[in-house]
């Protein structure tokens, strides 16, 4: 089959790889009809997530048709011919974490749990196409994929909704929604979102759906800010204004009630010296993150507020503002998204027209053009917000 593979730092290549096959009784094979390039894929391509190997198949946002199931798969949940969206965390459905609906913390799905434990203190769930740290599972930027625990994760789509309407239930829509949900939004809340990429856009939409009085979008790319503004959110360009000062102006001097970091480890900064500091430290691996968005969210949030972190962080960061966090009674909430928890409720919101996932799609390309897709997405060429790939 054809698949998009990691070939080294800043390099991907679509090539022929072996077709997947059933390895366990609860596996399924999915013929992929749509997949996507995610912002967190760039962390792999840029070399900031360890344990990638030449030939690893990328991609953790995909959907398609079930063409084969293992004999242990519950036929009441999944059958050949079902159209499914596959969540990016692989979850067993039986461990303590899964019982608590903390699916991205599944205790049984990562065969390389020992590596993750050394990195994070405890293991994390397996993730499709996201390094050997999270299990080394082949991803979904391919024609076919093996799906473990297939009767736990995939969501059957039984309506005539298009792939584009439901594909992002695999990751970025639930991730954005969880970021907003962790904010415990009240009707009077002003919510500021760092990052107007796809996850940030969905965090903004989710904050609106959950009742926020105002949602503020923080980014530097005019086309991203225009997209947020068209959706009813207030844009702030951090290259044109001092973000904290502008947020104080917009909130009567108090600061946003809730702040969402939808950027993660490769944040930019309007100040060249500050950006250079983190960029150099990251380049020489004395820290793995450029955590400016997180620092700014903590320093900007009103006292007693909540900072929700859904941007991906992979290791260690420098100059975390612990004093501001502790002394001003801030609550910090975070986590890889527990996608399985949110898929059905969000599907219902899509069906009711409350959220339109298609609004972030700017490019649709054949799978064989994945290398070009990564280039325009990473470098923000041609006003690229989200790339969908068609195998």
Image (cartoon, grey):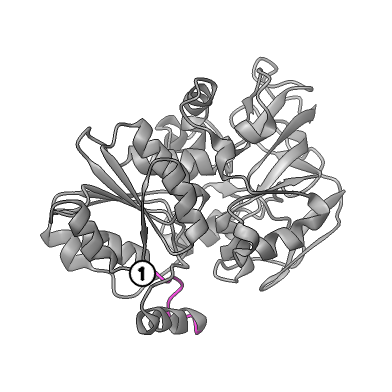
Magenta stretch secondary structure, dominant: loop
Name the side, left or right, on which 56 lies relative to 107: right
Residue 336 placement (x, y as % from top left): 46, 48
The span shown in magenta is: 284-292
- Which residue occupies 46% across, 34% down? 98
Specify whether residue 301 is in view. no
Q: Residue furthest top?
A: 76
Give the position of the C terminus as an image quadrant: top right
Q: Quadrant of residue 46?
A: bottom right
Name the side, left or right, on which 324 lies relative to 295: left
Name the side, left or right, on which 253 lies relative to 361: left
Element type where label 1 sits in the image: loop
Residue 280 placement (x, y as % from top left): 46, 84
Q: Quadrant of residue 212?
A: top left
Of 73 and 278, the residue lying toward us:
278
Residue 213 placement (x, y as % from top left): 25, 37
- Which residue occupies 73% across, 50% down? 141
Residue 188 placement (x, y as % from top left): 19, 36
Pointer 1 residue: 240
- Which residue occupies 52% across, 49% down? 198
In magenta segment, residue 215: no
- Near mark 1 (Cα within 10 A), the count class, few <14, some 14-19 or many ≥20, is few
In magenta segment, residue 288: yes
């Amino acid at each position: 089959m054809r698949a998009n593979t990691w070939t080294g730092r800043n390099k991907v290549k679509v090539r022929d790889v072996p077709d997947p096959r059933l390895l366990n009784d609860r596996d399924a094979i999915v013929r992929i009809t749509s997949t996507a390039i995610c912002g967190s894929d760039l962390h792999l391509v840029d070399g900031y997530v360890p344990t990638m190997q030449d030939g690893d198949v990328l991609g953790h946002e995909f959907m398609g048709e079930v063409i084969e199931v293992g004999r242990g798969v519950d036929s009441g949940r999944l059958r050949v011919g079902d159209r499914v969206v596959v969540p990016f965390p692989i979850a067993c459905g039986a461990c303590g974490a899964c019982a608590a609906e903390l699916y991205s913390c599944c205790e049984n799905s990562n065969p390389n749990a020992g590596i993750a434990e050394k990195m994070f203190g405890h293991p994390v769930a397996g993730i499709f196409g996201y390094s050997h740290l999270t299990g080394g599972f082949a991803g979904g930027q391919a024609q076919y994929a093996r799906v473990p625990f297939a009767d736990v994760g995939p969501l059957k789509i039984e309506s005539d909704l298009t792939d584009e309407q439901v594909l992002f239930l695999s990751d970025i829509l639930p991730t954005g929604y969880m970021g907003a949900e962790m904010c415990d939004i009240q009707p009077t809340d002003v919510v500021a979102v760092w990052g107007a990429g796809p996850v940030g856009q969905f965090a903004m939409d989710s904050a609106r759906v959950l009742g926020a009085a105002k949602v503020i979008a923080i980014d530097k790319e005019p086309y991203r800010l225009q997209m947020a503004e068209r959706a009813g959110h207030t844009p702030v360009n951090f290259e044109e204004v001092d973000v904290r000062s502008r947020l104080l102006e917009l909130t009567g001097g108090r600061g946003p009630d809730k702040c969402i970091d939808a950027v993660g480890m490769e944040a930019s900064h309007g100040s060249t010296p500050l950006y250079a500091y983190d960029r150099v430290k990251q380049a020489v691996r004395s820290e793995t993150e450029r955590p400016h968005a997180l620092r700014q969210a903590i320093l900007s949030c009103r006292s007693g507020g909540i900072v929700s972190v859904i941007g991906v962080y992979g290791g260690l960061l420098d100059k975390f503002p612990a004093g501001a966090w502790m002394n001003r009674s801030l609550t910090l909430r975070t986590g890889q998204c527990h996608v399985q928890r949110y898929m059905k409720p969000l599907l219902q919101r899509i069906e009711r027209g409350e959220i339109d996932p298609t609004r972030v799609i700017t490019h649709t390309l054949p799978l064989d053009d994945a290398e070009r897709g990564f280039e325009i997405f990473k470098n923000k060429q041609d006003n690229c917000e989200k790339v969908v790939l068609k195998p």
